[in-house]
Image: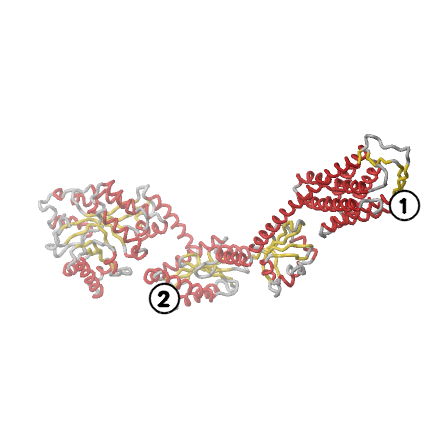
Amino acid sequence: MTQEHDIRLVGLAAAICFLSSLTGFALAHQVRSAAPQKQAAWLLLLAFVSGAGIWATHFIAMLAYQPHLPTSYAPGATLLSVLLSIAGAGLAWKVALQGGGHAGLLSGCTLAAGIGAMHFTGMAALRTTGQLEYSFSEVGLALSAGLVCTVAATYLFVTTKRSRFISAGVLTLAICVIHFGSMAAVTIIPDPEITIPPSAINTAALTVIIGSLSIAVLGITFAVAAMEARLRRHATEEAERLKHFAQSALEGLAILEGDRIIDANETFWHLVGYDASQTSDQLRLLDFLPCRPEQRENFLISAFQEQVLRNATGGMIDVETAIRTATVGGVHREMLVIRDITERKAAAARIAHLASHDPLTGVANRLSLGRFLAQSVTNASIEKPFALLCLDLDRFKGINDLHGHPAGDAVLIEVGRRIQSCLDEGDLVARLGGDEFAVLHHTEEHPHGAAVLAERIIDLVSQPIAFEGLSLLVGTSIGIALYPSNATSAEDLHKKADLALYRAKTEGRGILRFFDEGMDRQLSMRHSMEHDLRMAASRSELHLLYQPLACLETGGIIGFEALLRWTHPVHGSVSPAEFVPLAEDTGVITVIGEWVLRKACQEAARWKQPLKIAVNLSPAQFGTDQIVDIVKQILDETGLDPGRLDLEITEGLLIKNPERALPILNQLRALGVRIVMDDFGTGYSSLSYFRTFPFDKVKIDQTFVRDLTESRVALAIVKAIIGLGKGLGLSIIAEGVETVEQMELLLAEGCHKIQGYLVSPPQPIGHFEWLVLDPLSSGHPCHGRCDACFERLRAPTGLRSTRGDIMHLSTSRM
């Protein structure tokens, strides 16, 4: 070979061959990773570089061949050899890139065939003054050796990650074996009769062509090398960035090769509890996800599914797993994503607990009771009855008002605990809201077992409750309904237990009552009355009575209190003690209260005499945000002087929300109306009220006035209230005065303003027309001061004064 070839050109041919092969493998990787729409262009470039490199290798080697005869090359065959080289290389690469079980073998065979076809077509293009003779055995040996090498090169590319330099070196060896092995098999026999045609390409022109192609291949090689360097930098940066993101991820991320973990982030290693340096590339899925191999496809899917992870210490962790596809190092891999859901499940459990339990006491809530009650109704039978106990606490409001909400909360918590301690397995206690509880009780001793449980609860709840050094006392009343004997549904059972509770509270606190059918009739009656009360104002069934207020100093009437009455079309006159609580329970009191205020102001506005008009405000009215606007609107509508309007409020209204009450009272006083504390002494009376709230008058409750002549305690209380009023500059009014003796005692203590049946019972305003419009209409020159006028005022009571000289009543301004 060294005698027939220029060894320098042979070395150049080998170098060109290796560079083109190396560039080809680099471009093949680019084709594989390129977007589908760009793969065809990259494949064409790959075919050109590989085919041109093979062709240039052949013809540089042919230039190195020195047969010592003149040589040239036929243009057509030479061109054909180039095309065959490019086509063969392109087809071989396409087969290799498509993959498959035999891709390495098929692409290697295709490439060997392309190289052989190019070689012998190029040899056919050789023009010299001699004849070529081949040793076919040597040609076959060269082609076989080349085939083995091409198959080895493509197989390495298809199946392994080995360095492309190795693959390029093996392919270079294959090309050189085919070329030089085939050249060793040829012999040129000189023949003077053979001439070289003028159209043949001489070696100088061929050198230019080969040089151009070689330069093109080298240029592409350098361009690809630069591109690969840039891509490597980008890939390195991207890998670092992805690694940073992966390490920062809250989820555990692991790259899989089959069932084997080949890489993972820190979160993953923390979850599984293994040391990455000791177990990386050795840990398998079954080491931490306990499942049988056949179950793998059931949970390693793209959608997250809950699993239980077993860590290195054997602990179990609730996780979600999913499989994602990721390209790692140019290879598509499965990536296992593991998300720790321990806190989420704990939070869900807490939310579920909160959804079914009272957050203050920890017992079940109304929703949970409804669910268990419905289930009990479904499972109940004559042989398996159950009872529902409804409870609310006695004296709880007073504890809340006097000691504040923390004390009330402590009471509710302790009561819930005490009730829970009374229950048997399968029973349920629930807080329905406020101070209301319910107990679902299953017992075979029906109804005796429910009564025993209720008595135990009443006894236990009534025991003192310690709170910040105080001993708080509450009690409970209990209503009991039985299923299925008292009800046909859960809702019906609850309603009837409530009715029994209502009966227990009305008959005496701290007792239990079972439901009976008479309670249903009472409920129906109550519902009917509620409906009728809502319609009462529009049906003109409501009306006002007026009770005068007298001044003992002047002997005159100073005003009236407006009192609401309801005449039912069927039941007749309904006591305010019955319908006012009903109106407060249903919320209709706000509408009725506004009607009373407007009606009373309209009436007072038409009086000729500037007498006072007093109207009660209910807590519900006072609790609305519009109360000040409503009072102002009514005063504007009626034209009543605000100074003539007294608004009476009770202590309970102040206790409920003193921070809210103060600004409202100040705004009402700013309108010019007067504020009166009604029923003073009957609630949780506190001297701080007079310091905090802007009262103008105080009314002594009739319960103290009634006992003035029989009780020294009542007299002492009345004296104290009168003295307090004088000291604070407040006007004191005694209500419920019915006897002369009561009047004289009050007068002796300095209380000069009274209201009650001694003066007059509540009457329609028409009874007082002669007084409020024009005292002269009485026909007496005394202007209403004489005993006859006084008797006319008091006539409906049937009372007669033995001290008529004290009571000379007339209209007078306060």
Which residue is at the front of the view, 635 or 49?
49
Q: Quadrant of residue 21?
A: top right
Residue at the spot of label 1? 137
Q: Picture coordinates of residue 359 (x, y %)?
A: 45, 59
Q: CA distance from mark 1 to mark 2?
A: 119 Å
Nearest to N terminus: mark 1 or mark 2: 1
Q: Which residue is rendered at x = 37% and y = 59% of the image?
A: 505
Identify the coloring: secondary structure
- From this view, report whether residue 379 is shown above or below residue 141: below
Q: Picture coordinates of residue 397 (x, y %)?
A: 35, 60
What amino acid is found at the position of numbered circle 2 in the picture?
Answer: Leu
Dot 1: few (<14), some (14–19), or many (≥20) neighbours within 10 Å?
few
In the image, farthest residue toward the top: 198
Label tally: 2
In the image, farthest residue toward the bottom: 469
Query: Can residue 13 be seen by looking at this rendering?
Result: yes
What amino acid is found at the position of numbered circle 1 in the picture?
Answer: Ser
Q: Quadrant of residue 606?
A: top left
- The answer to whether 674 appears left or right of 479 in the picture is left
Q: Picture coordinates of residue 459 (x, y %)?
A: 41, 67
Dot 2: few (<14), some (14–19), or many (≥20) neighbours within 10 Å?
some
Secondary element at tag 1 = helix
- Do callouts 1 and 2 mark residues in contact (Cβ within 8 Å)? no
In the image, farthest residue toward the left: 781
- The answer to whether 744 appears left or right of 290 in the picture is left
Residue at the spot of label 2? 473
- The answer to whether 429 appears left or right of 585 in the picture is right
Query: Can residue 83 be seen by looking at this rendering?
Result: no
- The answer to whether 540 appears left or right of 725 in the picture is right
Secondary element at tag 2 = loop
Which residue is at the front of the view, 273 or 802?
273
* Nearer mark to the viewer, of 1 and 2: 1
